[in-house]
Image: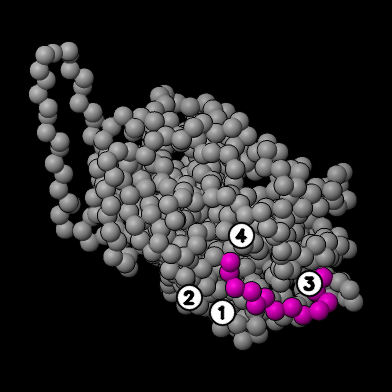
Amino acid sequence: MPSFQPPRRAAALALSLALVLPTLGGLAGGSAAVPVPIPAPVPALPAAATDAPKQPVPVAAVPTVATPAPAAVQVRGLWVDAFGPGLKTSAQVRRMVDDAAKMGINTLFVQAIRRSDCLCRRSSLPMITDADLQPGFDPLEAVIKLAKPRSMRVIAWASVTGVANAAVPNSNPAHISRTHGPNMGAQSWYSRRPDGTYLEGSDAWLDVGIPAAADYITAGVVSLVKNYAVDGIQLDRIRYPDGGVWGYDPKVIARFNAETGATGIPAAADPAWQDWKRDQVTALVRRIALEVKGVRSNLWVTAATITYLQPPRAGDLVSFRRTRTYNDVLQDWPTWMRDGLLDLNVIMNYKRDGMADQAAWFDGWNAFAASMRPRADGGQAELAVGTALYLNSPAVIAAQAARAVNAGLGWVGYSYRTPNVDVYGNKATTAQGLDVIRALLTAPGAALNVPTRWTASPPTSRGLLGRVTGAPVLGNRVVEALQGGEVVARSLTDGNGYYGFAALKAGSTEIRVSGQRWVDTIPAKGVVRLPDLLVRDLQPVPALPPAKSVPVSPAPVVTPAQP
């Protein structure tokens, strides 16, 4: 496996002294850890090969044993969105759950976070402001109460970076479009183009490169699993907007320059700039995944991921890195699967079989995604194929679902509200559309003919989460995890100083960051939270001119942070 090439900032840090101390009163829930000082920073590793992954990669040797064929994925799901009827009244929810049950659906991906607001009443986010929402109604709670007795799992679907739609803004004064909106100067959290514009169509997006925005996003998702009996969460819009020209908020540029040693404003096609932004997306997935698992280790962490245009070849990460998924919207979901950050990847394989090469693209993306299921720890990520009901005829919908299921993959349709192209084109009602596709999907030999329960447990049930503090620049620091004296994984800190690992074996684990190390135990289940590590980067003493006698300066004295 190729070696990981540390970022440019890591080489600069090798010239300074880094002191890491446990902060008194660190992250809650961490077990007692033993600080073990080492005398010098970890040396930089050799440069990676040209085609090496840009993301940190595990480096443990891969055993030369046959990998068992993965079990068939049992997910048979529907996305239920909040852009029309389905979730806004108790009657709509009752009908939606009934319709799903009749179709043989075993999982509902229910929109909970829409645009930094919630279709729920017990989260850290404000409620949606929608005239069609039944007063006092909690859609997420209602779905849970009705679906679970019918053996359906409920996944809370969160639009991670969606913040506002200019045509239908949230009117709550506490909504972040008003507290951290486009006209709030340095307090704005919006992603921007180089010219300062921020709308993609009518939509505004949060920038994951702004640490305060990443904290806010994480808190919103975690509040769902703390307050509702959901079976997991799904991350949607966990990316940058289309176009490849985003991230130009001045705070983001300043952070990129500080962490990498770059200067000025990066060009949109600058590979270092693209890599850095992609790292911010992955860091947010990592942080959310580990925070969620820290609440309940049996929760599913899923994402709805991008599959634009032609597929890469199965098993070929080099060809994946030429796709728009990787270079435009800056998603690296193969890494998320490999590193145990996703239990279930639902690829949004929105293709129309009747158009040009799209049927082949559909099958090709399915094959590539299936080839990415093996994880660094020897397990298998779950995979489901998301299909665009709203773009296709009932016959194509049934055919695509069958191809997914026959390949041993799960299936999820978008969406309940627009169950086929005729409904989307206002040529049929939702009820009519559902009747037609239900007949085809449940016919003998069809994908949903035999009722299937999704009983699998998530493949990730443990992890480690920590944070460095105290330095002006917290992000982009190389973190190594060692077990049995061997480096088994590497990662980077995010802009808030957080780092973590998921696909590691239980047991004693040593963490190295900024020249020091920390030892703790990863449990069989659950997430160990390390105490905050206080990092102080000290500039080296300038070299003195030659002299017959040179006095030796005493080493700097550093005391633990005070509570």
Q: Residues within 10 Å of mark 2 (few under 14, many from 20)?
A: some
Residue 102 appears left or right of 281:
right
Q: In the rendered image, which residue does mark 1 sit on?
A: 144
If you read the primary sequence from the N terminus, does the residue marked by circle 4 or circle 3 appear first? 4
Q: Is residue 163 visible?
A: no
Can you say which quadrant of the picture contains the C terminus?
bottom left
Q: CA distance from mark 1 to mark 2?
A: 8 Å
The numbered disc on residue 434 is: 3
Q: Earlier in the sequence, mark 2 or mark 3?
A: 2
Q: Is residue 533 left or right of residue 173?
A: left
Cβ atoms under marks 4 and 1 closer than 8 Å = no
Crowd tier of the residue under label 4, counting other residues whose Cα lies within 10 Å: few below 14, some 14–19, many 20 or above: some
Query: Which numbered mark, 2 or 4, is in the foreground of this view?
Result: 4
Q: In the image, 317: left or right of 474? A: right
Q: Disc 3, disc 1: CB below 8 Å?
A: no
Does the residue at mark 2 contact the one at mark 3 (Cβ under 8 Å)?
no
Q: Is residue 64 above or below residue 233?
A: above
| Image location of residue 10, percent across then percent down | 39, 34
What is the three-letter code of the residue carrying label 3?
Leu
Observer able to see residue 536: yes
Mark 4 → mark 1, Cα distance in angstroms: 33 Å
First to last magenta residue range: 447-459
Q: Mark 4 — residue?
A: 378
* Foreground of the two, 274 or 351: 274
Q: How many marks?
A: 4
Ranked by sequence position, the earlier of labels 2 and 4 is: 2
